[in-house]
Image (cartoon, grey):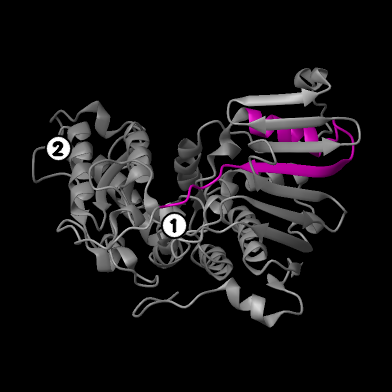
């Protein structure tokens, strides 16, 4: 961290010395502005597929950011991203944004301040761990990690190396979610007793035969630490467009909707329930699910999970056929339902509720990426920091384990392990394919 900031300080100081010693040469005003090259945050992107490309476009719009490197194991997508960056900055062909197939080469660069990691979920833990060790600040798309163990490792490394990590749980940067959680935290609906979360349903895939690996794709690197499976395009990502990839429905790479959308909605559920020690995690979980009997996709379809907390609050996370898609907080005197671009309350007068000086007010921020960039500069905690991201992801993953085992499980949220069932505790981590580890 000190190396990074001394480098920037040197550049700024050196520029001023050069200007003074070179008088009367004219130096452009942009050299000294708040968005001058010496003040910009330099970014590297690791993963530029469907979500990565969207994040790339968004961050290109920041004057105080310079994207100088992109990495992807699919050369078509890699070159698309480079062209997008170079076109935005007006740079010539074969110059400007550098490209990498191996993320470790990008992390080796001393001139990169921060990285944006938007890979398939099974890669999140290893890459984020290496980024923290390299001293890079990190924007890590949700879900934070594929396993509970990986999340604990990342949370510890972020503290050890003093880096900033923002999880891509952008609903914390949307006003309607913040307002809903403030209503709940301040008991405007009375004492909270039940939370209902509804998530979309993953479809069932057809039986598909393996096909030839595209020349543009380094499939060995794409699989990485996961169990090797023969290449099927619909189990990886589309070659002709940036539509929803098939890996999001394969359990070796992700947990399905319980993390894909659960990482958003269960995060908001936790935000509304509060940060008191007894709310750090549930004490009991039960789950059941319908899994596909065949086909290339194997994440749950319809499902039902019940969480019980130490203060007797119960949370039910189900598919949207049972619970409406979104989050509903139910209290003794009313309720609030919230999802993207929508908030409803009972009584309706709660929509106009005000807050007094002694009321709880939550982290106010309306641009998730801007919050990340600002926190890099100020070294302050972002709206979706690593600890909250880890605990929200735990809530998702113990739900997945409850569905998989179809058991009533007791959870120790302090030790981050199940109580009295070592067989189930083995699911907190996973085996990695050589040579990968965390």
Mark 2 Cα-neighbour bin, 10 Å: few <14, some 14–19, many ≥20: few
Taking the spot 26% from the left edge, 29% from the top edge, the residue there is 30
Task: Give the alpha-carbon distance from disc 2 to disc 1, as whole Å.
Answer: 65 Å
Spot occupied by residue 285 in the image (x, y as percentages of width and height): 75, 61
- Against 239, residue 414 (above or below) is below
Tell me the quadrant of the picture where the N terminus can be found.
Answer: bottom left
Residue 122 appearing in the image: yes
User: According to the image, label 2 marks what residue?
Assistant: 22
Q: Residue at x 32, y 41 (%)?
A: 53
**Mark 1 surroundings: few (<14), some (14-19) or many (≥20) residues within 10 A:** many
Identify whether 361 is placed above or below 109: above
Q: Image quadrant for the C terminus? A: bottom left
Point out the tag, 2 or 1, that comes first from the N-terminus: 2
Q: Residue at x 56, y 63 (%)?
A: 155
Report if residue 117 is visible in the image.
Answer: no
Magenta segment, which residues?
Answer: 176-205
Secondary element at tag 1: loop
Residue located beneath label 1 in the image: 297
Comparing 300 with 332, the one in front is 300
Q: Residue at x 35, y 43 (%)?
A: 50
Quadrant location of residue 81? top left
Q: Secondary structure at mark 2?
A: loop
């Amino acid at each position: 961290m000190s190396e990074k900031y001394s480098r920037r300080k040197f550049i700024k100081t050196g520029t001023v010395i050069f200007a003074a010693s070179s008088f009367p040469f004219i130096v452009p005003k942009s050299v000294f502005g708040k968005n001058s090259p010496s003040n910009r945050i330099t970014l590297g992107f690791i993963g530029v597929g469907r979500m990565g490309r969207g994040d790339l476009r968004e961050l290109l719009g920041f004057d105080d950011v310079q994207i100088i490197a992109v990495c992807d194991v699919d050369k078509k997508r890699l070159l698309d991203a480079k062209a997008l960056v170079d076109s935005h900055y007006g740079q010539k062909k074969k110059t400007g944004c550098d490209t990498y197939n191996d993320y470790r080469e990008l992390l080796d660069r001393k001139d990169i301040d921060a990285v944006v990691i938007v890979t398939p979920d099974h890669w999140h833990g290893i890459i984020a761990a290496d980024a923290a060790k390299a001293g890079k600040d990190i924007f890590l798309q949700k879900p934070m990690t594929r396993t509970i163990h990986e999340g604990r490792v990342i949370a510890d490394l972020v503290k050890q190396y003093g880096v900033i990590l923002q999880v891509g749980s952008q609903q914390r940067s949307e006003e309607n979610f913040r307002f809903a959680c403030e209503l709940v935290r301040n008991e405007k609906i009375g004492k909270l007793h039940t939370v209902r979360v509804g998530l979309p349903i993953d479809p069932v895939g057809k039986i598909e035969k393996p096909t030839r690996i595209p020349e543009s794709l380094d499939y060995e690197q794409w699989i990485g630490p996961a169990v090797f499976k023969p290449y099927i395009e619909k189990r990886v990502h589309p070659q002709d467009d940036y539509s929803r990839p098939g890996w999001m429905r394969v359990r070796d790479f992700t947990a399905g909707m319980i993390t894909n959308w659960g990482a958003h909605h269960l995060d908001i559920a936790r935000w509304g329930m509060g940060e008191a020690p007894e709310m750090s995690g549930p004490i009991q979980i039960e789950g059941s699910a319908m899994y596909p009997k065949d086909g290339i996709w194997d994440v749950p379809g319809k499902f039902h999970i019940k969480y019980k907390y130490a203060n007797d609050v119960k949370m039910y996370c189900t598919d949207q056929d049972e619970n409406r898609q979104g989050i509903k907080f139910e209290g003794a005197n009313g309720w609030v339902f919230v999802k993207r671009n929508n908030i409803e309350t009972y009584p309706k007068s709660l929509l106009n509720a005000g807050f007094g000086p002694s009321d709880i007010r939550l982290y106010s921020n309306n641009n998730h990426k801007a919050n990340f960039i600002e926190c890099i500069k100020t070294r302050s905690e972002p709206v979706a920091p690593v600890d909250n991201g880890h605990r929200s992801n735990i809530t998702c993953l113990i739900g997945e384990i409850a569905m998989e085992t179809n058991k009533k499980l007791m959870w120790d949220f302090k030790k981050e392990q199940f109580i009295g069932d070592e067989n189930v505790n083995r699911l907190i981590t996973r085996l990695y394919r050589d040579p990968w580890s965390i």
